[in-house]
């Protein structure tokens, strides 16, 4: 059952303790409700994707209580610092390179080298982040393909029974998601319009462009239908083949269940066929096989098939993209 927690010190302390135990808690923010998990825990993050029923791993936004905490996890530049001064806490998410000491699990960022970070303004979110004292990964608290919830009742309808608790902070003030701004290139690209208007961003930094003009400029007129398509995805440098039923002696194996015999190097996603465990290990396992396989001069990576149900669909989607290079 999903417990409804009041937004008082006891409710907030209980939410923080559930999150520390790797459970999922829906939390109010000023934009929309988020489905929060400890961003350092691969298993907790995998549960987020499972609860949302996402067919693929979108990178999640990581929430922290203040800018100084954010700069531990990502590398800010002058633009990021200026925007943080103007808009945090608030409805602006910045995409920046992960820092060397970044503690956020790879799955939370869908394997990317970048991370989306935000300091929410909602007093309950603020109190929870300070009590939890760590990064919280939180996508909007809706099932995949549905609109973002802006009341506790919406969250109940979306995720009731699928998550440990729901912290009730009343209706969300802003009601639309945060603006997502990519600062990883020379232009500041708005990946998703949201609570902070583009004009407000332009009053603080130069070179802010909407996603379409960026896409047209950089891809020679090939239009992009969705901002999601601007996302790069993690691809190993060794060739990857999927649905392997046999493995060669110069190949590394990404195993799911009992490993195929004969591989030069093996990483196990889940011995017992547990898809949450498999998702939590996916990116770390791929990176390890890629680095170690390259070091040993192996010819490629063979990935065993994963069932397509539940999180298996998202795992398969990532593997297929990685296989396309
Ligand atoms: O207002 C909000 O942003 C809410 C509250 C809960 O904070 N969160 C939210 O999260 O809307 P979500 O997961 O539904 O949307 C996150 C957006 C997605 O469009 C995702 O593709 C983008 O942020 N995003 C996350 N990490 C990214 C990254 N490393 N690079 C580019 N885009 C990223
Ligand atoms: Mg969403």
Image (tube, helix red, strand yellow):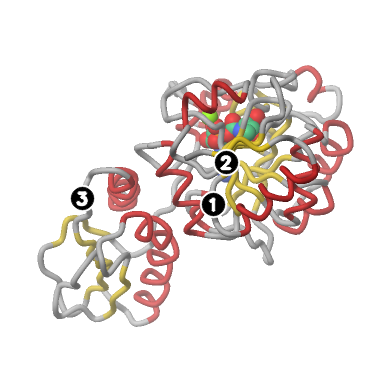
Q: Which mark is residue 307?
A: 3
Q: Give the CA distance from mark 2 to mark 1.
A: 8 Å
Q: Earlier in the sequence, mark 2 or mark 1?
A: 1
Q: Which mark is residue 23?
A: 1
Q: Position of residue 156 (x, y in %)?
A: 52, 27
Q: Position of residue 266 (x, y in %)?
A: 28, 76
- Judging depth in this view, the residue of 34 and 217 nearest the camera is 34
Q: Earlier in the sequence, mark 2 or mark 3?
A: 2
Q: Quadrant of ligand 1?
A: top right
Residue sitting at x 54%, y 21%: 154
Q: Is residue 120 above or below residue 70?
A: above
Q: Position of residue 179 (x, y in %)?
A: 67, 27
Check whether the beta carbons of the residues at disc 2 and disc 1 lie within 8 A of each other.
yes
Secondary structure beneath dot 1 equals loop
| Side of 279 where 118 appears, left or right | right
Secondary structure beneath dot 3 equals loop
Secondary structure beneath dot 2 equals strand
| Side of 230 where 104 appears, left or right | right
| Side of 107 where 268 appears, left or right | left
Choose mark 1 or mark 3, whichever is in front. Answer: 1
Q: Is residue 144 above or below residue 9?
A: above
Q: Would you name the residue on which mark 2 appears?
A: 165
């Amino acid at each position: 059952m999903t417990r409804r927690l009041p937004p008082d010190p006891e409710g907030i302390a209980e939410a923080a303790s559930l999150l520390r135990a790797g459970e999922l808690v829906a939390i109010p923010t000023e934009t929309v409700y988020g489905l929060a998990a400890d961003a350092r825990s691969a298993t907790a993050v995998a549960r987020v994707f499972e609860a949302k029923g996402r067919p693929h791993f979108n990178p999640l936004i990581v929430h922290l209580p203040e800018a100084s905490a954010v700069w531990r996890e990502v590398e800010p530049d002058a633009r990021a610092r200026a925007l943080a001064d103007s808009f945090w806490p608030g409805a602006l998410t910045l995409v920046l390179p992960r820092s060397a000491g970044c503690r956020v699990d790879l799955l939370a960022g869908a394997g990317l080298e970048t991370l989306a970070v935000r300091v929410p303004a909602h007093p309950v979110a603020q109190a929870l982040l300070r009590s939890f004292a760590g990064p919280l990964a939180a996508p909007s608290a809706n099932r995949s393909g549905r609109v973002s919830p802006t009341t506790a009742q919406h969250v109940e309808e979306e995720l009731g029974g699928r998550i440990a608790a729901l912290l009730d902070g009343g209706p969300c003030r802003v009601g639309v998601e945060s603006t997502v701004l990519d600062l990883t290139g020379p232009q500041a690209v708005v990946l998703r319009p949201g609570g902070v208007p583009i004009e407000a961003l332009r009053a603080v930094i130069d070179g802010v462009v909407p996603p379409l003009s960026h896409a047209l400029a950089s891809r020679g007129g090939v239009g992009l239908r969705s901002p999601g398509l601007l996302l790069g995805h993690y691809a190993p440098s060794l060739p990857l083949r999927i649905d392997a039923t046999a493995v060669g002696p110069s190949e590394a194996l990404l195993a799911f269940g009992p490993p195929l015999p004969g591989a030069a190097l093996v990483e196990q996603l889940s011995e017992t066929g547990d898809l949450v465990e498999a998702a939590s290990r996916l990116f770390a396992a791929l990176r390890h096989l890629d680095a170690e396989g390259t070091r040993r001069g192996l010819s490629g990576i063979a990935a065993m098939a994963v069932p397509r149900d539940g999180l298996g669909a998202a795992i398969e989607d990532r593997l297929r993209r990685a296989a396309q290079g």
